[in-house]
Image (spheres, helix red, strand yellow):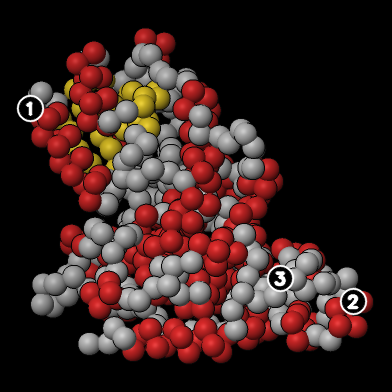
């Protein structure tokens, strides 16, 4: 007899509920990962790169304990159905996902396995609070973040994390045929554009642990204020590790709580960071109750928004060639590293939606392809928040001025000069609005607008008025 542990978005050994339950059974364990390219959505290029490296790391960690990760590609229901026929599996455990496709798949899987006489169970391994347990006083889903978060903290105790196993009893690893990770062709080759990703990231459980420790030592002090300044190393950068489940939320939560106890002066910083985790929880909550969140405006009136789709403007935004330095810096950071600072994510998203009047779905698709932390729930809810079409969203009429945003959050130009080096010799006075500099100033900085750096693709004030007029047309 053996117990199969199906790894999904939980590529770790530490605080892994399904794995811990398998260990408690006392049976030999079969660790399995199934690559289903279509479920719940085909992965973008940056996510595929991360997945390859994360699976490689998980396999290495399992090998240290005497086993190996079994890899299979295909429809998960079919793959599992075949395995339980071929092997003496009596139990199947996995951690839940919360998109509708995965929920439907899990339901089918459980019914099929139970019909075959197996014991199967799923666990909460990627979020802190189960969406189906959280309702407002009217028995309806929450639609505003703050009462949602207060309810979660008041009514649910967050369990302390469990350490990962130091020994595992594997079921004859050599007796199970596994596919080869390289055959899945998750890595880019022609061309290999992942150099920046390799330079910036260490996918896997050890990388996640290192990132958390680094954040606590360097980013957590002054996090509440510093997180808004992209030129400062104040954010945790844990999002891709959380996306692939290389570190548990409970581990992060209790590590931060311990910091609060040991260093009371960090109270506000810890509280603000945990609130950001709350927004991640709220995103999963919304995805659970509103499954079409990634593609359909949550607010019905926004489904008739008069977008002005323009491939040229979309491409300028994607390539970081809009003529607005803070926007271009963010888009180039994204393309080179697979990640973008959160403040700049809001600025670039607002610019695409409100200045360029492009559908938020096009931005969501681009982020899905280029982000290493492309998360179905967080990506969709973030874009809908900026668009004004989501639950508890930023009002559509709140239109970020990219010049003011740059001057406020990158006054010394550290961020812009790093990612838009053609402007590095321009003084702070004109760095966020180079088109206002006189020709002599531009010449001394080695800048030729329209050649070495583009003119703005739109005028801010005119674009703002156009966006507000578009909003007026859908008011009901």
N-terminal of the two: label 1 or label 2? 1
Helix or strand or loop: what does disc 2 sit on? helix
- Quarter of the image for residue 70 reads top left
Q: Report the residue marked by disc 1.
A: 115
Q: Residue at x 39, y 63 (%)?
A: 361
Against 311, residue 227 (above or below) is below
Instruction: Please name the residue shown 80% across and 85% down the image.
Output: 437
Quarter containing the N terminus:
top left
- Mark 2 vs mark 3: which is more N-terminal? 2
Earlier along the polypeptide chain: callout 1 or callout 3?
1
Quote the CA–CA distance across marks 1 and 2: 76 Å
x and y percentages locating residue 94 in the rendered image: 28, 38
Residue 303 image point, x, y percent:
27, 72
Q: x%, y% of residue 148?
A: 27, 74
Locate the C terminus and report the quarter of the image it occupies.
Answer: bottom left
Q: Is residue 53 visible?
A: no
In the picture, measured across the screen, residue 458 lies left or right of residue 399, that is: right
Please report contact status of discs 2 and 3: CB closer than 8 Å, yes or no: no
Q: Which mark is residue 454?
A: 3
Residue 73 in view of the camera: yes
Q: Quadrant of residue 15?
A: top left
């Amino acid at each position: 007899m053996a117990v199969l542990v199906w790894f999904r978005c939980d590529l770790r050994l530490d605080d892994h509920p399904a794995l811990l339950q398998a260990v408690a059974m006392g049976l030999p364990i079969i660790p399995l990962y199934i690559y289903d390219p279509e479920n719940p959505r085909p992965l973008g290029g940056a996510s595929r790169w991360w997945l390859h490296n994360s699976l490689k790391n998980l396999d290495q960690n399992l090998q240290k304990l005497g086993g190996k990760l079994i890899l299979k590609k295909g429809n998960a229901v079919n793959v599992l159905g075949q395995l339980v026929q071929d092997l003496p599996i009596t139990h199947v455990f996995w951690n839940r996902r919360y998109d509708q496709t995965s929920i439907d798949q899990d339901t089918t899987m459980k019914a099929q396995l139970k019909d075959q006489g197996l014991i199967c169970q799923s666990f909460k391994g990627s979020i802190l609070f189960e969406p189906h347990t959280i309702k407002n006083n009217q028995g309806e889903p929450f639609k505003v973040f703050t009462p949602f978060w207060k309810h979660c903290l008041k009514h649910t105790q967050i369990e302390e994390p469990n350490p990962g196993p130091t020994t595992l009893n594997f079921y004859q690893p050599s007796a199970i045929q596994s596919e080869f990770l390289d055959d899945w062709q998750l890595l880019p080759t022609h061309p290999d554009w992942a150099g920046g990703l390799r330079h910036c990231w260490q996918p896997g459980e050890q990388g996640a642990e290192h990132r958390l420790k680094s954040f606590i030592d360097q980013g957590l002090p002054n996090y509440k204020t510093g997180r808004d300044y992209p030129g400062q190393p104040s954010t945790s950068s844990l999002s891709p590790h959380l996306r692939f489940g290389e570190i548990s939320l409970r581990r992060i939560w209790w590590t931060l709580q311990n910091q609060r106890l040991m260093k009371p002066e960090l109270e506000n910083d810890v509280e603000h960071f945990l609130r950001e985790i709350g927004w991640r929880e709220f995103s999963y909550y919304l995805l659970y109750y509103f499954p079409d969140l990634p593609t359909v405006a949550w607010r019905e009136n926004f489904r008739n928004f008069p977008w002005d789709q323009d491939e040229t403007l979309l491409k300028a935004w994607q390539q970081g060639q809009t003529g607005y330095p803070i926007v271009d810096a963010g888009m180039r950071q994204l393309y080179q590293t697979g990640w973008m600072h959160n403040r700049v994510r809001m600025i670039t998203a607002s610019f695409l939606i409100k200045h360029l009047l492009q559908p938020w779905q096009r931005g969501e698709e681009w982020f899905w392809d280029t982000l290493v932390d492309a998360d179905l729930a967080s990506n969709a809810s973030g874009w809908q928040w900026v668009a004004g079409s989501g639950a508890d969203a930023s009002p559509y009429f709140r239109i970020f001025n990219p010049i003011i945003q740059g001057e406020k959050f990158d006054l010394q130009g550290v961020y812009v000069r790093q990612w838009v080096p053609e402007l590095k010799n321009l003084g702070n006075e004109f760095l966020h609005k180079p088109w206002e500099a006189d020709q002599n100033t531009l010449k001394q900085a080695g800048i030729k607008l329209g050649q070495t750096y583009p003119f703005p693709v739109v005028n801010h004030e005119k674009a703002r008025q156009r966006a507000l007029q578009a909003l007026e047309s859908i008011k009901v």
